[in-house]
Image: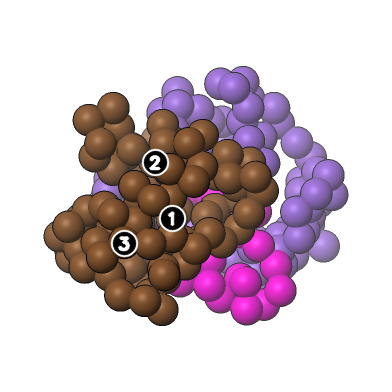
Amino acid sequence: MLVLGLDVWEKVLAHCLEGAPLEACGLLGGQAGDRAVAERCYPATNAAGSSRVYTVEPRDLLRADREEEAAGGELIGVWHSHTHTEAWPSPTDVGQAPDPGWHYVLVSLRDVEPTLRSFRIRDGNIFEESVVLE
Amino acid sequence: MVDVRLPTILRPAAGGAATIPAEGDTVGEVFADLVAKHPALRDQVLTPDGDLHRHLNVFLNDDDIRYLGKLDAKVSSADTLTLMPAVAGG
């Protein structure tokens, strides 16, 4: 389960909409665990500058890691947008997912109403998890 | 002595440590010392040819070593090397 603060969700969505039609991305920070809590988010530059793939700009990654450590939490996941497809991990997402402990959050802008879903990716397998907004 | 900070995903290969002190005058020498101390890290940070794995970001203090000469970048004591896996997808 991933608990997402409403302010985090608003910030994530705003960054995704600003980035469209390119994929937007960023990091989530907070408390890890079975009931992980994303307390903070760190919008990042998509260094790939693409509507089909993303790479979190390495300096944004370092900055987020340091800020999160200073805030007493840890990076617990990453989000990115799919501008023309559903919120489901692509083969590229699965192949490049580095951390089985992370939460991989997808935001789809394909439909009028944006959708957010969260996944764990382990050994090439996709496990969807519930998301609670609070 | 340089502090090498490891991301969570690499810590099991280093006995669970988050930070490992290592010696060397260049990033390459520090990596050599690091993998000598923790051989299980080798395949996760270096290619069979001894280059940095392309999915690994390495920062010398605040700077990406890609812009500092990569493995030839000079380091001095009190520097910190931070390793982070690239975060990417499609």
The N terminus of chain B appears in which quarter of the rendering? bottom left
User: Does residue A76 belong to the magenta stretch?
Assistant: yes
Task: Identify the element where label 3 is drawn.
Answer: loop
Give coordinates of residue A71: x percent, y percent: 67, 77
Chain identifier of the residue bearing label 1 in the image: B
Q: Which residue is mark 2?
A: B45
Which callout, 3 or 2, points at the residue further toward the start of the chain?
3
Which callout, 1 or 3, points at the residue further toward the start of the chain?
3
Nearest the eye: A84 or B62: B62
Nearest the eye: A19 or B54: B54
User: Does residue A37 belong to the magenta stretch?
Assistant: no
Q: Name the quadrant containing residue B29.
A: bottom left
Within 10 Å of disc 1 (Cα), the crowding (few <14, some 14-19, many 20+) is some
Q: Which residue is mark 3?
A: B24
Chain identifier of the residue bearing label 2 in the image: B
Is label 1 in contact with label 3 (beta carbons under 8 Å)?
no
| Chain A on-screen colour | purple
Residue B79 can be seen in this image: yes
The C terminus of chain B appears in which quarter of the rendering? top left
Magenta segment: A58-82
| Distance in Å between CA atoms under marks 1 and 3 | 16 Å
Going by the numbered disc 1, the residue's amino acid type is: Leu
| Distance in Å between CA atoms under marks 1 and 2 | 9 Å
Within 10 Å of disc 2 (Cα), the crowding (few <14, some 14-19, many 20+) is many
- The residue under the point 26% across, 52% down is B28
Disc nearest the viewer among 3 and 2:
3
Give coordinates of residue B24: x percent, y percent: 31, 61
Is label 1 in contact with label 2 (beta carbons under 8 Å)?
yes
What is the number of the mark on residue B83? 1
